[in-house]
Amino acid sequence: MLRNALFTISILLIVITALSFPDLFREYNGYQTTGLIVPLLMIIMFGMGTSVGIEDFIRVFKMPKSITIGLVCQFSIMPFVAVVLATVSGFPPEIAAGIILVGCSPGGLASNVMAYIAGANLALSLSLTALSTLMAPIMTPLLMSWLAGQHVPIDAFGMFWSITKIVVLPVIAGLVFNHFLHGRFAFIDKAMPRVSMIGIVVIIGIITAAGRENLLTLGFTLLAIVILQNLFGLVIGYAAAKLANMDEASARTIAFEVGMQNSGLASGIAVEMGKVATMGIAPALFSPSMNINGSILASLWKKSSTEKSTSSTT
């Protein structure tokens, strides 16, 4: 819990610093720092692969109903919530497309942390994050072409390759590393979670600096939109799971998986499209928003579970 709080605080501090001193984050000795975003994301995705084992995928076959419901919710609820919010916002096309891009992205690693804190179904959370990530090269370009094509030109194949390069190949490399070399390089196992957190913070700082002018113009309104996007995802995801008669722990998991997107991947796609200062802004704001909201909800659910457990034993 402390690590998650420090992570959220670090994100808030880096956003404030990047807005105040943008030149520190835009280039170094003539090198444009936006070039760091994709390599950092690849390292983060490799770290995700090293934290997942083959047994995590075997779990999928033991809970087909839960996995199916989770994936359907993941690739339906958030994309359409994003379209509604992007439409009513009246933002410029590329900013609106960034909101939709967040909604069309797979589940993020933060959902696993929140599921653990809340006492949700962690096995389901890990499986859904891994599967939605592997499905992203197909689902995200298709959804973006359908839902955001009127805002910006979408190169579906280009996006497919970008996601494959940024996510799938590093995750597979991490899986192979974990399967054959797990435990042989203990320092890597211990370092990767910290490296991932630092990488996300740096990425958000770079994107914030790159899109500073748009943020200062649209910041508070766009922040309100992405907060609503996250909250709607959490609430509707939970409600959908309950309507499907899922148990409480699994419903909490679906809420986090739906509401907490891989905003880092969305940022990487924006970079690959050359639109980091416009499409990349919503993902940059979504990350701290979802971590704050997710932390609060996870803590509340953990408290309610503890109180129920205490009352049942007295």
Image: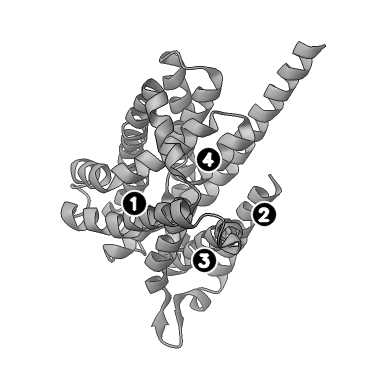
Q: Residue at x 34, y 26 (%)?
A: 68
Q: CA distance from mark 1 to mark 4?
A: 24 Å
Q: CA distance from mark 1 to mark 2?
A: 27 Å
Q: Place residue 210 in its image quadrant.
A: bottom left
- Going from N to C along the chain, the mark reached first, 1 or 4, is 1
Q: Which residue bears the numbered disc 2? A: 6
Q: Residue furthest bottom?
A: 29
Q: Which residue bears the numbered disc 1? A: 98
Circle 2 sits in a helix, a strand or a loop, which is it? helix
Q: Which residue bears the numbered disc 4? A: 112
Circle 1 sits in a helix, a strand or a loop, which is it? helix
Residue type at mark 4: give it.
Asn
**Cβ atoms at labels 2 and 4 below 8 Å apart:** no
Q: Residue at x 42, y 51 (%)?
A: 263
**Cβ atoms at labels 4 and 3 below 8 Å apart:** no
Which quadrant does the N terminus fall into? Answer: top right
In this orientation, which residue lies closer to the viewer: 46 or 206?
46
What is the total number of numbered labels drawn onto the structure image?
4
Circle 4 sits in a helix, a strand or a loop, which is it? helix
Q: Residue at x 34, y 59 (%)?
A: 166
Could you tell me residue 156's position as x and y percent? 18, 51
Q: Which residue bears the numbered disc 3? A: 202
- Going from N to C along the chain, the mark reached first, 1 or 2, is 2
- Going from N to C along the chain, the mark reached first, 2 or 3, is 2
